[in-house]
Image (cartoon, rainbow, N blue to C red):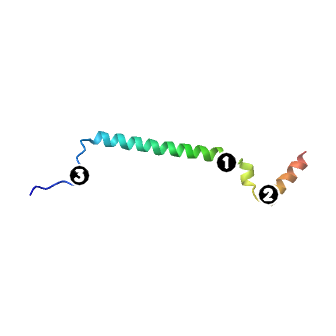
């Protein structure tokens, strides 16, 4: 009884596998670029994020009014 391989012979060589891998990696890279760009554009300005607590905002408002 001849041994049957469990690997399906598709006729595609290693070049096809590398091409499919590269296309998949580029697709993943594009998803990360889109999501990263969306997060970057929705980011708050640094002074509001750093001074998010109420005392910090009130001190900043006091400093601004004293400067005027």
Q: Is residue 36 left or right of residue 16?
A: right
Q: Which residue is mark 1?
A: 43
Quadrant for the N terminus, please.
bottom left
Query: Helix or strand or loop: what does disc 1 sit on?
Result: loop
Closest to the observer, 36 or 8: 8
Residue shown at 86%/48% (left/top)?
A: 64
Choose top left, top right, bottom left or bottom right for residue 13: top left
Q: Earlier in the sequence, mark 1 or mark 2?
A: 1
Residue shown at 22%/46% (left/top)?
A: 9
Q: Which disc, if any, is residue 13?
A: none
Q: Which residue is mark 3?
A: 7
Q: Position of residue 28 (x, y in %)?
A: 47, 45
Cβ–Cβ under 8 Å for marks 1 and 2 = no
How packed is label 1: few (under 14 Cα within 10 Å), some, or many (20 or more)? few
Q: CA distance from mark 3 to mark 1?
A: 49 Å
Closest to the observer, 16 or 61: 16
Residue shown at 16%/54% (left/top)?
A: 4
Closest to the observer, 36 or 61: 36
Q: Which disc, if any, is residue 56?
A: 2
Quadrant for the C terminus, please.
top right
């Amino acid at each position: 009884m001849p041994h049957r391989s469990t690997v399906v012979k598709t006729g595609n060589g290693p070049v096809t596998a590398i091409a499919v891998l590269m296309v998949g990696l580029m697709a993943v890279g594009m998803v990360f670029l889109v999501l990263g760009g969306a997060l970057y554009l929705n980011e708050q300005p640094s002074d509001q994020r750093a001074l998010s607590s109420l005392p910090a905002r009130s001190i900043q408002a006091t400093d601004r009014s004293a400067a005027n």
